[in-house]
Amino acid sequence: MTNERDKNLRRRAEDKAAAVAAQDIEVPSLAEAKRLVHELRVHQIELEMQNAELRQTRAALETSRTRYFELYDLAPVGYLTLGEPGLILEANLRAAALLGVPRDALVNQPLHRFVLPEDQDVYYLHRKQLFETGAPQACELRLMRQDGRPFWARLEGTMGQDAESGAPVCRVTMSDITEHKTTEERLRQSEKMEAIGQLAGGVAHDFNNQLAGVLGYADMLVDRLEDENLSRYARNIKMAGTRAADLTRQLLAFARKGKYAIVPVNVHRILGEVAELLRRSIDKQIQVRQHLDADPPMVSGDPSQIQNALLNLGLNARDAMPDGGELVFATRILDFADALPGDDQPTGRCLEISVRDSGVGMGPETKRRLFEPFFTTKGPGRGTGMGLASVYGTVRNHGGAIRVRSELGEGTTMLIYLPLLDQPVPDTPETPAVSAAPCHGRVLVVDDEKLVLDLAVDMLTRLGCEVIACADAVEALETYRRSWREIDLVLLDMVMPKMSGKALFEALRAIHPQVKALLASGYSLNGEAQSILDAGVLAFVQKPFTLTDLSGKVTAALGKNG
Ligand code: ADP
Ligand code: MG
């Protein structure tokens, strides 16, 4: 239409020019001159109007170009147009940004160049189905940025036609779903760990009871055997048993059966000890450093479990640096919400403990499995695979979280987040070790596990106590009802059929409000044990126990005024 008008205009202009040329030599009449001036004026106005129209069209074009730029290029998803062999024909800026390349470098590249080798099949199938069925398709795969960093992407494709050639093209949207995937993966991971924990906890608990027998009797043998050879055998049994008990303890810790103690803990003091220990014992090629910024550096929990966890992280870092390097312990305080964004995290402030090494780092497979009990990449006899499993349990026991940052060849940072104890509380000093001292009194022992019961009876007898043994809670209750006046102390098992340790304790207290009792359990000091302690049981005895453990607790309990 504009073309038509332009031609029209042109024709009239030429006519006029010809007329003017023809009249050139003649002086136009006045009327003629007036007409001419009028014509020129109209023409000028016409031109001005046309100009204005042109400007308007240009402005409209500009607006729609901006809108196109905003819609297409700045969209929150990547857009790609692919030709038949998977070549990128067009891409928006967001797509280029996601892949970390300038847009020009994308055009005429096959998209599969950006797909991780492991996920090529996924991509191939996606494209095949798209071209074959013509129906919209979606897939999730890992793409690789120009700099080599992979990310999870969701592709949604639909078929279309090229506007000019009419050739089939597919239009693909591409979005970064890494965060979503990580959350999903973490959830699956924690469900798996939960299941392994249940299994491991069950096995470890039973195994622990057997160990209590092995270890306890070996302990008494060591104490009694005069023959040097025999006593060495017994010491070896005890040593092996202790190592086994150590493993089961870690397994139980992993199984999240609670804390052994709940006291204010100064994390900096523990880090200081761990760093000192490592400095003394590891290769001088490894620099151990600390950046301790948290103030106050306090959490609530079990100092020995926390120390054990940090030591484990330190030893793993050492193993990752066979040729030396740097090991840095650091702490700071931040909000859980900032530390673990997007997670179902606890609220409030947390203490971050990071253990960073410049070692070999980990590949994705190791990163996926490192918290599993018995997962190790170290040779036989070198790793147990229980280190990080127990660290995991410890951290969870303390209401915290643990994260790993590591790439092969790039070193590793382990990050632990524990709820901050927001007052500068003085540290509780370590309790001094006690040695097996004789004690006197009449003790009622109840345990449904025959071996543990026998052991407790034998040990207490050895310590000089008079012992009444009961194989279950009902029998114990009957005995106590009959002769509570002659019984100085009751040693309770926590988990028993018929009646729990807690119910039994309450029944005993109904008979004699000042009853003195100790609680023994293979589980660590968890919620239930804590509630029995809160109800008035004097102390907690961890199974498997040694003569020393038992004598310390029994002496203290008997000494207390009931
Ligand atoms: P173990 O040390 O007995 O192998 P862990 O549970 O402590 O068991 O660790 C499991 C695995 O995780 C190790 O075998 C190792 O492959 C990997 N790992 C742990 N910490 C690091 C680290 N700092 N650097 C590299 N790999 C590590
Ligand atoms: Mg380890």
Image: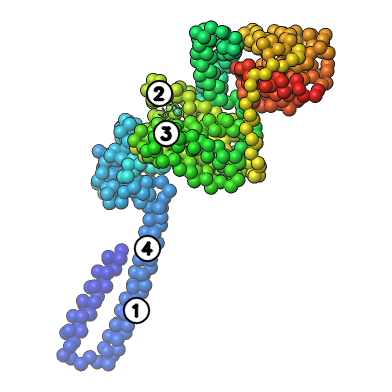
Q: How far, Cα to Cα, is label 1 from label 4?
A: 26 Å
Q: Ligand 1 near label 2 (Cβ, under 8 Å)? A: yes
Using a 10 Å C-alpha cutoff, classify the residue at mark 1 as few (fewer than 14 neighbours), some (14 to 19) or many (20 or more).
Answer: few
State which mark lies toward you, 3 or 4. Answer: 3
Q: How far, Cα to Cα, is label 3 from label 4?
A: 69 Å
Element assignment for label 4: helix
Q: How far, Cα to Cα, is label 2 from label 3?
A: 15 Å
Using a 10 Å C-alpha cutoff, classify the residue at mark 4 as few (fewer than 14 neighbours), some (14 to 19) or many (20 or more).
Answer: few
Using a 10 Å C-alpha cutoff, classify the residue at mark 2 as few (fewer than 14 neighbours), some (14 to 19) or many (20 or more).
Answer: few
Q: Ligand 1 near label 1 (Cβ, under 8 Å)? A: no
Q: Which mark is residue 157?
A: none
Residue 425 drawn at (x, y percent): 66, 42
Q: Which mark is residue 45?
A: 1
Identify the residue position indicated by label 3 in the image. Answer: 282
Mark 3: which amino acid? Answer: Ile
Identify the residue position indicated by label 4 in the image. Answer: 62
Q: How far, Cα to Cα, is label 2 from label 4?
A: 70 Å
Element assignment for label 3: loop
Instruction: Mark 1 and mark 4 in contact? Answer it, CB < 8 Å.
Output: no
- Of the numbered discs 2 and 3, the one sitting upstream in the chain is 3
Mark 4: which amino acid? Answer: Glu
Instruction: Please say whether residue 210 is visible from this viewpoint.
Output: no
Say which residue appears at 39% left-offset and 37% top-offset: 284
- Of the numbered discs 1 and 4, the one sitting upstream in the chain is 1
State which mark lies toward you, 1 or 4. Answer: 4
Mark 1: which amino acid? Answer: Ile
Identify the residue position indicated by label 2 in the image. Answer: 382
Say which residue appears at 52% left-offset and 39% top-offset: 272
Element assignment for label 2: loop
Q: Ligand 1 near label 4 (Cβ, under 8 Å)? A: no
Q: How is the image coloured?
A: rainbow
Say which residue appears at 27% left-offset and 65% top-offset: 3
